[in-house]
Image: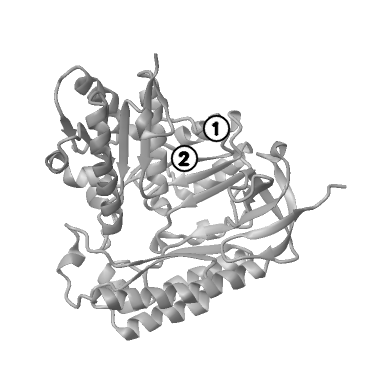
């Protein structure tokens, strides 16, 4: 009889794909996904530690599992991901009902660790780093019925931004061989996947540690040359490493979608220097200008941090000014959250929490106006929508995304799933578009 596995994924798209790999590995051990922890024999929390709020959510979720484990003592509870990497055995001390802690380089050891616990070997923890990340080679199948999938092309980061724990928890950059990535994309296409998102902490530096002249631009061209994938996206890009060669591919490669996520973090040169970002606001503005020159319809999204240590009111106003100049299609914005082990912890000029909250409210209000303005510019235009399935808000409607990564809801039928549908945008909202299918001649 199959055993049940339930994985709760916190954080980024990289974690989503790591969870798919965990499901794949445990499938070979006789575990099948279930929809609730109550049905599970193995519960995994795949964690994120990039902000304190995420940590609080994880600990709350872990606490709720305590009573469940009392009622079902044979259940195994595991914690993986970045917070597991950060805390290690300390996690076992914080939660006496936790069985397994495994770090970002040890996903491949999960089956072995589960077997050890099940056979009475006691609680286990492994947060060791390896010279090469074994799980990079694991090719997990996407969830049944999905039209899009993630493909990890690299892991780790060498940038050491002063606020960021990723280099400490994911390790140095490691790129997968180009041929290995191309082979995975062919397999995904054979399984009906029509869109892939290439993942890495800094995809623009892909290939630096590989022999033979591999680069991110070359990877994008070779994926396009395969001719098997309808759409290709990527995340995340470090602005400093976004080359003119990659910029020039937008609007030229058939499969490369007209969308880029390019985290700026601040519009102030003083704050960017304190963050160790390696570029100025003018550098960033020029790159966005180049992107829009080669691809006028490109959608640009970004990340922004407010209340970084030393950020003055003048610095904050420069961030708002940058937003006015660019008018992002979408923005992920956060209050600065102090992370143990980062350089920023020791920086002077801490911004009070109430001031961070005030600045975030102002910034998000401005972004809402810009997002609605950008969405309204699509009213009356025809777009290509890759249909993902029924709309969550109304099962009588279908939902999908444009090449610019905008959500479109429209009247349709279930058989449209996975198809490219030409749709006329009839109304724009803050977070989505309303469309009507265009009849094919």
Tell me: residue 67, above or below residue 393: above
Q: Residue furthest top?
A: 1
Looking at the image, residue 59 sits to the left or right of residue 146; the answer is left
Residue wearing tag 1:
188
Instruction: Residue 333: name its quadrant.
Output: bottom left
Residue wearing tag 2:
151
Tell me: residue 241, above or below residue 253: below
Q: Residue furthest bottom?
A: 314
Looking at the image, residue 168 sits to the left or right of residue 254; the answer is left
Q: Position of residue 128 (x, y in %)?
A: 18, 37
Nearer to the camera, 387 or 6: 6
Q: Disc 1 on helix, strand or loop?
A: helix
Question: Which color scheme is applied?
Answer: one colour
Q: CA distance from mark 1 to mark 2?
A: 9 Å
Q: Please say whether residue 405 is visible from this viewpoint.
A: yes
Tell me: residue 311, above or below residue 417: below
Q: Position of residue 372 (x, y in %)?
A: 59, 70
Confirm or deny contact between disc 1 and disc 2 (CB under 8 A): yes
Q: Residue 337: which numbered mark, if any?
A: none
Q: Position of residue 164 (x, y in %)?
A: 27, 59
Q: Residue at x 23, y 74 (%)?
A: 309
Instruction: Specify which label sits upstream in the sequence, 1 or 2.
Output: 2
Q: Please say whether residue 51 is visible from this viewpoint.
A: no
Q: Residue at x 62, y 53 (%)?
A: 403
């Amino acid at each position: 009889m199959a055993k049940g596995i339930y994985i709760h994924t916190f954080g980024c798209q990289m974690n989503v794909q790591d969870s798919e790999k965990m499901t794949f590995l445990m499938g070979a051990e006789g575990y099948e996904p279930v929809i609730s922890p109550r049905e599970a024999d193995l519960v995994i929390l795949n964690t994120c530690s990039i902000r304190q709020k995420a940590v609080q959510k994880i600990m709350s979720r872990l606490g709720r599992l305590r009573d469940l484990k009392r009622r079902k003592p044979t259940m195994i509870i595991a914690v993986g991901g970045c917070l597991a990497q950060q805390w290690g055995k300390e996690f076992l001390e914080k939660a006496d009902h936790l069985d397994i802690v495994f770090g970002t380089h040890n996903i491949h050891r999960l089956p072995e660790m589960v077997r050890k616990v099940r056979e009475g070997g006691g609680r286990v923890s492994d947060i060791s780093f390896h010279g090469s990340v074994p799980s990079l080679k694991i090719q997990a199948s996407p969830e049944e019925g999905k039209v899009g999938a993630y493909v990890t092309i690299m892991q780790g980061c060498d940038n050491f931004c002063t606020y960021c724990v990723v280099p400490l928890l994911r390790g140095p950059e490691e790129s997968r061989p180009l041929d290995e990535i191309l082979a995975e994309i062919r397999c995904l296409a054979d399984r009906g996947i029509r869109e892939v998102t290439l993942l890495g902490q800094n995809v623009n530096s892909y290939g630096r540690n590989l022999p033979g002249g591999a680069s991110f631009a070359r990877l994008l061209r070779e994926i396009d040359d395969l001719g098997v994938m309808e759409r290709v996206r990527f995340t995340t890009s470090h602005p400093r490493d976004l080359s003119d060669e990659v910029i020039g591919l937008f609007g030229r490669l058939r499969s490369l979608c007209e969308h880029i996520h390019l985290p700026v973090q601040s519009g102030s040169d003083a704050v960017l220097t304190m963050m160790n970002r390696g570029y100025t606001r003018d550098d960033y503005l020029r790159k966005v200008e180049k992107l829009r020159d080669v691809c006028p319809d490109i959608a640009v999204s970004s990340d922004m941090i407010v209340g970084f240590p030393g950020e003055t009111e003048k610095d904050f106003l420069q961030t708002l000014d940058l937003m006015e100049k660019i008018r992002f299609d979408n923005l992920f914005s956060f209050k600065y959250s102090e992370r143990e082990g980062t350089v920023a912890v020791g920086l002077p000029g801490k911004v009070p929490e109430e001031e961070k909250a005030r600045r975030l409210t102002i910034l998000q209000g401005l972004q809402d106006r810009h997002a609605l303005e950008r969405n309204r510019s699509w009213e009356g235009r025809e777009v290509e929508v890759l249909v993902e399935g029924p709309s969550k808000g109304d099962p009588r409607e279908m939902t999908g995304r444009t090449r610019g990564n905008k959500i479109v809801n429209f009247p349709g039928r279930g058989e449209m799933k996975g198809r490219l549908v030409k749709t006329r945008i009839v109304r724009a909202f803050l977070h989505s578009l309303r469309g009507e299918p265009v009849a094919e001649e």
